[in-house]
Amino acid sequence: MKKVVKRTLSMTMAATMALGLMVGCSSAKGEQKSESPAPQSDQKTEASGKPVTIKFWDGNWQEAVWPEVEAIWNKEHPDIKIEAEFQADLANDKYMLALKNGTAPDVLSCALDWVTTFGNAGLLAPLDEYVAKDSLDVNQFVKGANDASTVNGKLYGLPFRSETYVMFYNKDILSAAGYQTPPATWDEVKGVAAACTNGDVYGYGLCGTNYSNFSFQYITMLRSSGGDILNADNTASVLGSDVAVQTAQLYKDLAAYAPASLLENDNIANRTLFASGKIAMYLSGIYDLAEIVKANPDLNFACTMVPTANGAERNTILGGWSVAVAESSKEKEAAWEFVKFLSRPDIAAIYTNTFTGTAEVAARYTDYPEEIIKPNADALQYANALPAVENIVGIRQAIMDNLQLMLSEDMSAEEASGLLDQATTKLLK
Amino acid sequence: MLRKIKRSGAGYVLPAVITVAVVMIYPLLYTLVMGFFNNTLFLEAPVFCGISQYKKLFEDKVFLGSITNTLVWTFGSVFFQFGLGFIMALILHQPFVKGKTLIRILLMIPWVTPSIIGSAVWKWMYNADYGIINFIFSSLGIIEKNQTWLSNPKIAMWSVIAVNTWKMFPFILLMIEASLQSVSKDLKEAAVIDGANVFGIFKNVTWPSIAATCYSTILLMIIWTLNAFTFIYAMTEGGPAHKTEVMAMYIYKRAFMDYDFGIASAASAVLFALSMFVSLVYLYLTREKEGN
């Protein structure tokens, strides 16, 4: 009897497990069918007059201003609902996975070089037809942003945010070292940094980690010294050139005036150190402004243009973010409406924490001192986007990998630049 | 036929086998096959390329370095995790130790703390300029000047191994302590009567009882650690200059920075082969010892 009960129980459990597996598989299949190519299983077509729902992803640094933007959108477009998700871990790898497996939102907020990469991979929808249909003037946007978002002649994103680097400097530290004005050339920066380094205060905040921050610093120094990472038609690396070697040496020289934690410091660490009065100068964008003021409202600081070298014309990197439509979106028309909306200058002024895609300052900075805002605004005219090549992310990673080698193993700038040049050439193939 | 299946018990484990096959074996085989295909984000379809990607891998100094880093990371972590966990378990098992439950709870804190939070805290503790570890060590006169724990190529890996040890030794402690409960008190008393000292009791009574648990735990830790890279990703990102870049980190960078899934798959296959080899060698060595 006991054996029979045991056997029955075991068979019942096995059958339940098998049933659960089949149900699980079929619901997974069901979910897959409705999820891919787009995650909006609850949406109805605009044609029937019922509301359309589209999904939008952005970083959580944008979440605070979303309610104001959403309220304006809902008034203007009551027929299209936006489900916005603000992610703490927004990164290119998350987007890549979502775009590849068809679970991406309809509209994505992308850094400019991500638009280049995903546009190259055919994962974003070209916007040219919509631009032509609505006679949208894309020339109103910063040229560099359009360049970065255009791949093989097709436009893949509209910018709502644009920025470039300036040099933040602590007026009190410079003044104590005998400097009333900030340096204008990289040679002067070395002199000022040396004079400001004293005790636990350091002359210059370099990035030693985070490939995005590290490469932005290096490329900014390189371009403002008259160099670049690729040749004019983006077919070959010029990271082994004399200017590139000189810039790598500059990075090494400035490391002597940076904190010992250099190789652990990204931009956020440098911002924290700057706000705490521990570093005299560092390169960053206007997006650091609010956080610095919040951390230390009494900090006496200002901004100035990125220094130059070799008598070169000022040339920095245009950073920024665009809104793009996923190729897998089932509601491209509605998504386009939102892309147009968010990149509109008056809306972008509310949403952005730097400058709009049309180079107007963010609304939140209207009360900030001119000596901080003006250099940031003026600097935009000298900013150019990174090359629109498919492996730009890999190239930026290679910059950090090889220059970290130079800094940590005391390798010469020539050798490090040579390795970097080889790595970039391989990636271009 | 059905009766045979019922008798053998195969029918009862079939659902679990199917689940494992779908969730584990299919992705494993797919990854192994993809290692022979050129497959990037920018190609419309994978292109067969034979063993050229494996050739590329073994010509890449960074990959070869990552193999060495992986072995140092794995065996360094397991050595200290097991050593610390084992000693703590022995101490906790002693009758004179009071408040065992409270001590166990406190010692579990590293294990239950999410790794990413632990990484953030330890990263600040290790900070070369403002970290508390340098402050304490300097105050005690252990170091003369601040150390760059996470950016010195010679010590960065050991700094992360220390964090991994902190995280996982409670698991070892739990496993060994549970095993120590099963050691026969009668045998111990008999050994004492026979004149055995502490070492003799451990060698002839305690160790034979807990050896199997120890071997299994070490094998588990080896396999887990071979594939783990959370602390490395969060604390050093594989730097400085690839000095802490283990194979798992290399695979991640190839897949998600270079968007080269073919190379990442080939590297994953090599990691799988390494895991299998290490596990088989370990099982062979420990099986011999159990036989003896």
Image (cartoon, rainbow, N blue to C red):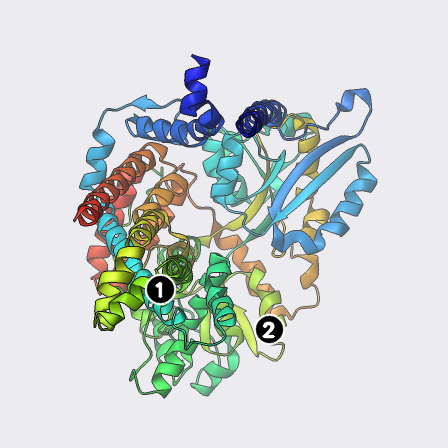
Q: Amino acid at mark 2?
A: Ala
Front residue of this view, candidates A376 and B67: B67
- Callout 1: SS: helix
Viewed as shown, does residue A84 lie left or right of B129? right
State whether residue A241 appears in this view: no
| Closer to the camera in the image, A369 or B33 | B33
Q: Residue at x 35, y 60 (%)?
A: B184
* Residue located at (49% from left, 33% from top): A119
Residue found 65% across the figure and 45% down from its top: A85
For label 2, count other residues whose C-alpha is less than 10 Å away and answer few (under 14), some (14-19) or many (20+).
Answer: some
As measured in the structure, the alpha-carbon distance from the residue carrying label 2 to the one carrying label 1 is 62 Å
Does the residue at mark 2 contact the one at mark 1 (Cβ under 8 Å)?
no
On the image, the x and y values in percent for residue B126 come to 39, 71
Q: Is residue A406 left or right of residue A110?
A: left
- Farthest residue toward the top? B1
Q: Which mark is residue A278?
A: none
Residue A177 image offset from top left, x and y in percent: 42, 85
Q: Which residue is mark 2?
A: A295
Figure check: A261 above or below B274: below
Amino acid at circle 1: Lys
Task: Tell me if mark 1 has few (under 14), some (14-19) or many (20+) residues whose alpha carbon lies within 10 angstroms of its own.
Answer: few
Residue B281 location (% of width, % of height): 20, 44
Which mark identifies residue B185? 1
